[in-house]
Image (cartoon, helix red, strand yellow):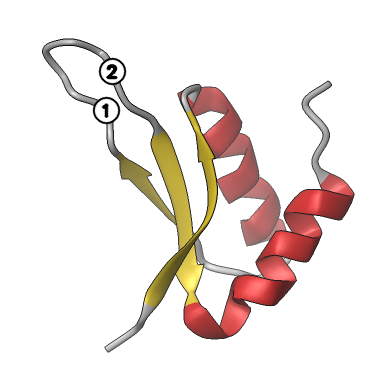
Amino acid sequence: MTDWQKVYSDKNEYRANIVVSVLEDFGIQPVLVNKKDAAYQLGHFEVHVAADHVIRAIKIIKDDINFN
């Protein structure tokens, strides 16, 4: 069983999908978790990776993704 850890969270689904795509390009297999309430559209999206990829994924997100 894989122990999944959150490495990114955002209210915008498109940003979370970009993070997923970039991590996949680096050979990491992330999972997108929808934490948004369907009725009220409150919440956010989370990107999770296997526990042994957490440090590498966080570094990739910090160094290679810029939404500004």
Tag 2: amino acid: Leu
Q: Is residue 9 above or below residue 50?
A: above
Quarter of the C terminus within the rendering: top right
Residue occupied by mark 2: 42
The x and y percentages for residue 45 are 41, 36
Q: Residue at x 33, y 46 (%)?
A: 33
Asked which quadrant contains residue 35, the reply is: top left
Tag 1: amino acid: Lys
SS at mark 1? loop
Q: Is residue 31 above or below residue 54?
A: above
Residue occupied by mark 1: 36
Seen in the image, is 44 located left or right of residue 16? Answer: left
Are discs 1 and 2 less than 8 Å apart at CB? yes
The x and y percentages for residue 36 are 27, 27
Numbered circles on residues, count: 2
Quarter of the N terminus within the rendering: bottom left
CA neighbours of label 1 inside 10 A, class few (<14), some (14 to 19), many (20+) = some
Seen in the image, is 32 located left or right of residue 30? Answer: left
Q: Residue at x 80, y 41 (%)?
A: 65
The label shown at residue 59 is none
